[in-house]
Amino acid sequence: MTIGSIQITWQLALLAVAVTQWLVFVIAGIASKKAGSNLLFSSIGLALTWIILFAAPVMATAKPATETIDASMTGKTPKASCASLKVGMTSAEVRDKMGDPDEVVAEDETRGPGAEMMIYRNSRCAVHVFNSKVDFID
């Protein structure tokens, strides 16, 4: 049903009935200068109606925070963590344990020829390799 430019759904109509009933009991409580159990039950009914109509559907469709974090990652899942790596391992052993790095950066200018950094974003670590051997791990 449409009234003017407002689309009236069954949820909105049910909420309007619950709010109207609640207002009637509020006004009756003010007029008699004492709030009775009718106002209490009407308030509980309004709260339940609100939860059923609006809060429950939102909570049912909400995604857990972990899904949001996972969606922002590159999608590569490491085979192991950087804690399983040791200084002196070969870069081939690192790749066997961790898989292919997300990025390999040459460090020839800062650490000399044969130096590179293997970056694993999901594990949040960088493996610094010198002459195909792990030099240190960040």
Image (spheres, grey):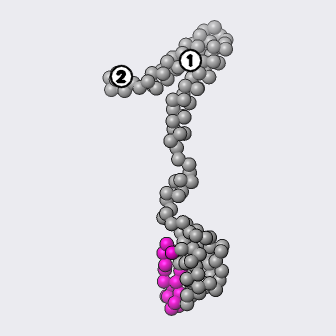
Residue placed farthest to the top in the image?
32
Residue 102 highlighted magenta (yes or no): yes
111 left or right of 87?
A: left
Residue 27 highlighted magenta (yes or no): no
Contact flag, marks 2 and 1 (Cβ < 8 Å): no
In this rendering, the answer to whether 124 lies above or below 38 is below
Residue topped by disc 1: 22
Q: Can residue 111 be spotted in the picture?
A: no
Instruction: Classify mark 1: helix, strand or loop.
Output: helix
Residue positioned 50% across, 88% down in the render: 108
Q: Position of residue 82 (x, y in %)?
A: 62, 73
Residue positioned 65% across, 80% down in the render: 86
Instruction: Classify mark 2: helix, strand or loop.
Output: loop
Residue positioned 53% across, 39% down in the render: 60
Picture quadrant where residue 1 is located:
top left
* Region of the chain picked out in magenta, as a range: 100-117
Q: Residues within 10 Å of mark 1 (few under 14, many from 20)?
A: many
- CA gap between label 2 and label 1 equals 24 Å
The three-letter amino acid code for the residue at tag 2 is Met
Q: Position of residue 25 (x, y in %)?
A: 58, 13
Which is more N-terminal, label 1 or label 2?
A: 2
99 left or right of 1?
A: right
Q: Residue 54 versus residue 34: which sits nearer the camera?
A: 54
Q: Can residue 29 be spotted in the picture?
A: yes
In this rendering, the answer to whether 136 lies above or below 16 is below
Q: Position of residue 26 (x, y in %)?
A: 59, 15
The three-letter amino acid code for the residue at tag 1 is Trp
Q: Residues within 10 Å of mark 2 (few under 14, many from 20)?
A: few
**Which-is-in-front pick, marks 2 and 1?**
2
Q: Which mark is residue 1?
A: 2
